Amino acid sequence: MRTEPHEERILLIDDDPDDVELTSGALRKMNAHGSITIARMAEEGLTLAGQQNWTMIFLDHKLPGKNGMEVLPEIRLLAPEAGIVMLTGHEDTEIAIGALRAGADYYLKKSANMALELPLVAREVSEKRDLRRTLAQTTDRYRRLIENMSDLVYELDEKGCFRYISVAVVSLLGYTPQELIGMPYSQILSKNHLQLHGRQFHERRTGLRATRELPVYMKAKTGAVKTFAVNASGIYERHRRFSGTAGIARDITERRQTEESLQRSQQMLRWTLDKQERQALDLHDGSIQSLYGIGLSLEYMLQILGNDHKEITARLTEARDGLNNVIAELRNFIIRTPPDLLLSIDLEDAIESLVQAAQQTTPTRFNLAVDLDAIAQLKAETGTQILFILREAISNITKHAQATSGVIRLGMSGGRVRLDIEDNGVGFDLESRQGAGHGLVNILTRAQKLGAALDILSAPGRGTCLTLTLPNEDESAED
């Protein structure tokens, strides 16, 4: 916002009486409601420059003692918001460039036309001053915003040394900004990531090609290593000259640790389930079959002995019955996996894992189709039971049905969740259930527990089709 005319405070530093009269006269016409203070020596001008909040300062180049160029930098420090005009009696490009570099806003040659030129110059200088003030306020506002951010904001020069780093570095890495300003960025990057991602941290690219969410390991002052997600972009001056990098680094150490812990837990869970599955298979294929063979031998001995050796027969009968009980308990153990081990596993992933495992270890190929809308309808416990049913069915298909292919579909039908399992295996007789295997009993038991309808179509040599239709939530609640 520009200063009103009656508030203009002008300092004129010039020792030539004629020039003072000429310049001050032109300034009074331009600034009728303001004040004009005159200093005739450089030292006097310096003293006055720091005493008031000047709107504009007109400084003559040729002064006794120190000239205007010598005192200009000091005046700029004393009056940072003032608009400064360098006055000279003759045109000199070198002096003009030097004055502008030293802090002047304008360079003006004294002439008889000053009364006409000064208002134009004053307007331009005033606009420059207002822009400088606005820029300073904006810079200060953004500086405060950055200093209150929890993320690490940094700026590197073209050589990769810190030109700026926010105070967040104190809480994040234990350094003060003063310790890192002027130091290379290698001071805080871990050695491994220095080689891998040093160029991205000291990014030269801009726009879509610039670094985005790059995980980078940084070293704290204590030696601890933290993980940051870095966004960085190159800074370019005029004529596309690279001048450094601006970046923001967000601490994601805890998030990464949580993700890694979750991955380890998932791996451990998969390992536990795989181990349990292997143990069940080992028991079924090894121990149970061996015990079953012993039971057959005992049965054969009972047939040979007949009724002639009643005491021995009684003992053998007792041993046979005990052996059958052991076999039953082992079979129950195989199918009795604790449901809570499966509740945290995504059902779709678990089904895919079962099918993939079957295809890796058997020649049977499966066509799998899973509807996510159907999965969304299932409670965790229901999903677990479906997974057990599917495991039993796949086991029967791959071990007993001698099938080369199968189809597994989990989807919606008539507003209910439906599971279809088909194979092209040897099939079995539905009435006698000869060749159906022990797994079918488990499937029936679990279907009843769910209150689901189970339909089985099969015939010798024609494969098997199993359809499980679950009740909806309202029906389950009524039951």
Image (cartoon, rainbow, N blue to C red):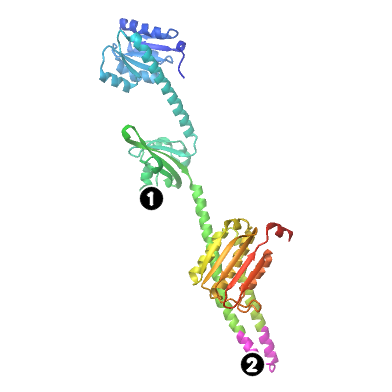
Question: Residue 317: where, in percent of width, then height?
Answer: 67, 85
On whether residue 300 falls in the magenta region, the answer is yes
Picture mark count? 2
Label 2, residues with CA under 10 Å away: few <14, some 14-19, many ≥20: few
Question: Magenta stretch mostly in which secondary structure?
Answer: helix
Question: Residue 432: where, in percent of width, then height?
Answer: 65, 79
Magenta segment boundaries in residue numbering: 296-318
Tell me which label, 1 or 2, sits earlier in the chain. 1
Which residue is label 2 attached to? 304
Which residue is label 1 attached to? 192
Residue 21: tell me if it is visible.
yes
Label 1, residues with CA under 10 Å away: few <14, some 14-19, many ≥20: few
- Residue at the spot x=34%, y=18% of the render? 106
Quarter of the figure with the C terminus: bottom right
Considering the numbered disc 1 on the image, is that residue within a helix, a strand or a loop? helix
Question: Residue 154: where, in percent of width, then height?
Answer: 41, 37
- Residue 426: quarter of image: bottom right
Question: Residue 449: where, in percent of width, then height?
Answer: 68, 65
**Depth order, front residue of 266/346:** 346
The reply to whether discs 1 and 2 touch (Cβ–Cβ < 8 Å) is no
**Depth order, front residue of 252/472:** 472
Would you place residue 20 above or below residue 215 in this image?
Answer: above
- Residue 384: quarter of image: bottom right
**Depth order, front residue of 69/460:** 460
